[in-house]
Image (spheres, helix red, strand yellow):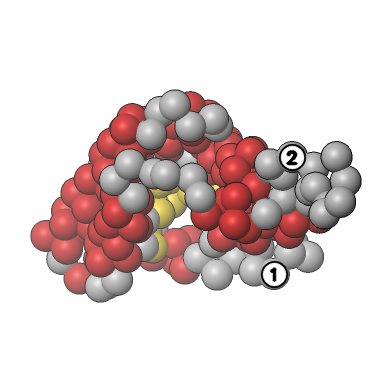
Amino acid sequence: MLLLGVMLFSLIVGLARGGSLVAFGQHRWRFPFLPVLAVGMQVVGFLPDESASGAARTFAAVLHILSYLLAFAFIWVNRRTPWLWLMAVGLVANAIVILANGGFMPVSPEAVAGTPTAEVIGRGHYNNAVLMGTATRLWFLGDVLRTPRWLVPSRAFSIGDLTIAVAAFGLVQHLMRPLGPIRRRGTA
């Protein structure tokens, strides 16, 4: 959800700066289905109640990790596109903490309190998140930050998510940039 808000904001800023949705749409991506497939895997992995069984949690964790591999593959094949290197840094940070914690993103109780995913506090896990505890590895890379409470819905996020959001903003601004001054008929 954080990334969706950043993308919308990026498009608005890009248009305000004189950018073009046409220019944005003209970028030629290699294997554009990879990020769509990655998001789809996360939706499928965390759609059922993963607490139903150990097998369901394992299935969700495996799909979560595989979705990151697809995202990395997409970035690799499009690595010459500006800002994707920074997106890769954020993905690496998230992937490391997720791998270190059994395929789930650790979330601090303080960051998630009062958010739509606050259910993690009572259950110990919720969708792709697991509540931080004394055994949490690399906790500082987990969801320890939080959007302002006045922002609805408020969300917990990680430094990796923040890095991905900055990269996404920069990427959209780059892809929407005006292609040059508009020439009017009859002017040289």
Whether residue 37 is visible, yes or no, is yes
Q: Amino acid at mark 2?
A: Gly
The front one of 94 and 56 is 94
The numbered disc on residue 166 is: none
Please give the name of the residue rendered at 39% of the width and 44% of the height, measured from the top-left corner. 29
Residue 74 coordinates in the image, percent (x, y): 33, 40
Q: Amino acid at mark 1?
A: Val
Q: Residue at x 44, y 62 (%)?
A: 120
Residue at left 22%, top 53%? 63
Dot 1 lies on which element? Answer: loop
Q: Position of residue 53 (x, y in %)?
A: 15, 66
The answer to whether 122 is drawn above or below residue 24 in the figure is below
Q: Position of residue 111 (x, y in %)?
A: 61, 51
- The CA distance from mark 2 to mark 1 is 38 Å
Question: Marks 1 and 2: in contact by CB < 8 Å?
Answer: no
Question: What is the crowding at mark 1: few (fewer than 14 residues within 10 Å), some, or many (at least 20)?
Answer: few
